Amino acid sequence: MSTLSGEGYSVEFHDSDECVAISGTLRLGGLSEYAPLMDLLIQAMQQCRTLTLDLRELEFLNSSGIAALSKFVIRARDHDGCHLVIRGSSAVPWQGKSLNNLKRLMPSLELHFE
Amino acid sequence: MSTASARIGSLTFRQAAVTVVVVLLFGLLGGLIELATEWRSIRQQVPEQTRSTLELVRGPATTAAYQLNETLGAEVADGLFADRRFHVITLRDNFGTTIAERERAQAPEPGPLVRYLFSDITDYRIDLVRAGVIPERDQQVGELTVQLDETEIAAGFLDRGIVVVLVGLARALGIAVLVVIIFYFMITRPLLRLHGAIGRIDPANPGQWQAPRLRLHDNDELGQVTHRLQGLMGAFQRVLEQRDQVQHENARMGAELDVSRRIQHIVLPSNDELAAIQGLQIAAFMEPADEVGGDYYDILRHADGVRIAIGDVTGHGLESGVVMLMIQSAVRTLVAHGEQDMTRVMTVLNATIYNNVERMGSGKNLTLALADYRPIRDAGESDARGHLRITGQHESVIVVRADGGMERIDTDALGFPIGLVEDVAEFMAETELTLQAEDVVVLYTDGITEAADPRHRLYGEARLMDCIHTHRRGSADAIKQAVVDDVRGHIDTQTLYDDLTLVVLKQG
């Protein structure tokens, strides 16, 4: 299990159930500050046949974070051999439009709202 | 410094005064106890001594009384009278006749205190009895009475009292002086030095303060006070520096906000430009949030009609303002270039913004909707007056028809956030509308629908649609003003968290 955490957020990769859970409020400054998270996601994607991104507890993601997540989804789209699942929450305002846009970037992405 | 030394001086003086008073009180109390003990012992000793003296002369006195021998009586009286304490001596026979009598002439009158203390132990009398063969034959032959001089009895006692008071006073003064000297060297002098050093603290630069080195006080409370003060001054210095930094940062951010606000307004279309457009009434409104956001709108005339743009750059501040300025230039460039294909327009805009935002490394992107209006000059049988093509992912577009019918155009499927990914061509689509006279089209940013009231309830799309519907018969400007007033009424005293932007089109 690898983890990342900082003020107000935490990222946990459980390789046993092939799931990256991101929770809290992520408002890092600029794309460069999202690089460690990107590295973790790409590494997870390369390890797993099916990778689940659990964002249900991610209450806020700033625009740099949404940009980073979009870039990751494009990487996942161009990378064969990993099925991507994103679990979101319809109770979290930012997720509705943004996660649907991710789905449009990668039609094979499985998107579940709870 | 004068007040400082006055304060220290008064401290020393008070300390000395309190010490004197306390030691005096205790000395006096001790002296009083001593004198009381002395008094009790005098009152015990004097009667005992007097009685034993009288016992010594009992024999000759009895003989003198029995024989009525005045010579012997005088001897007895004189013998007793040699003791200065005896004031009056009287020897009488049993018929009351005086055999011998002595009284000291120039005896001073005793004071009231002396009389109070000793007047009850001055008078003594012994019966002179001549012993018979058996006790029943004893015969009283006279009596010897003496009176002691109170002043003589008290003389030693009063001297002792004066000594006790004087010694007490001297002791009190001595102890006070000693205490003051010891305290001066142990506490007052280092305090004075600390006090002087504190007076030299520079309020603007407390961290530079050098605490005085108090010799022999390194490990006591004074040493700790000094040490803590030094620490406190360091802390003050850090707080002052932080304050300066925050002030500097606030000033910088204030300047940046001013610049952002100017950037946002500097390229907005003027009312004259809007009024010059024929056939379509256009009214627009923008109010920046307290922390300027990245709202954008533009109305650009071109050969065939008008292009309306509305967008919202993510985030706040200068960078959002710069991205907004870029999108404004790019949209205008493409209008000037005469590009009609909306998908190509959007693709070029996205590539421009994406590559610039990559350089900025900020991850900014924006929602952007473009509406291209063309008047219909010859509609034949139809009432159609204008044609509107809408593209780009943004908030919904609200259409209220002249007859009150309402349409809400969801733009989510018409585009993609601009600047988020490299190529958006595949996500672009457009929708078309035909406008008849008095039809109203409203574009807005989420600042309007997400405007919160003091209880954090959002204004909402439904209320916006109701408001437009209610005022649809007014001019574009009147509808705009009605919505702005309604939103402002809703916000009330709440902070404006996001920019408010509203564009109202009304087909003439």
Image: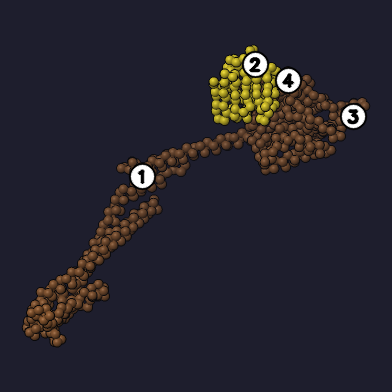
Q: Which residue is mark 2?
A: A83
Q: CA distance from mark 2 to mark 3?
A: 53 Å
Judge whether B68 appears above or below A64 on screen: below
Q: CA distance from mark 2 to mark 1?
A: 72 Å
The amino acid beneath tag 3 is Asp
Is residue B154 something that shows in the picture? yes
- For the point 69% across and 21% down, the residue is A103
Name the mark on residue B222.
1
Q: Which chain is brown?
A: B
Q: Are marks 1 and 3 on the same chain?
A: yes
Q: Give the percent coordinates (x, y) of residue B251.
A: 58, 37
Is residue A26 something that shows in the picture? no
Q: Which residue is mark 3?
A: B383
Name the mark on residue B427.
4
Judge the density around disc 3: few (<14), some (14-19), many (≥20) Cα neighbours within 10 Å.
few
B470 or A97: nearer the viewer: A97
Q: Are marks 2 and 1 on the same chain?
A: no
Q: CA distance from mark 4 to mark 1?
A: 77 Å
Judge the density around disc 1: few (<14), some (14-19), many (≥20) Cα neighbours within 10 Å.
some
The amino acid beneath tag 1 is Leu
Q: Quadrant of the C terminus of chain B?
A: top right
Chain of the residue that carries numbered disc 3 in the rendered image? B
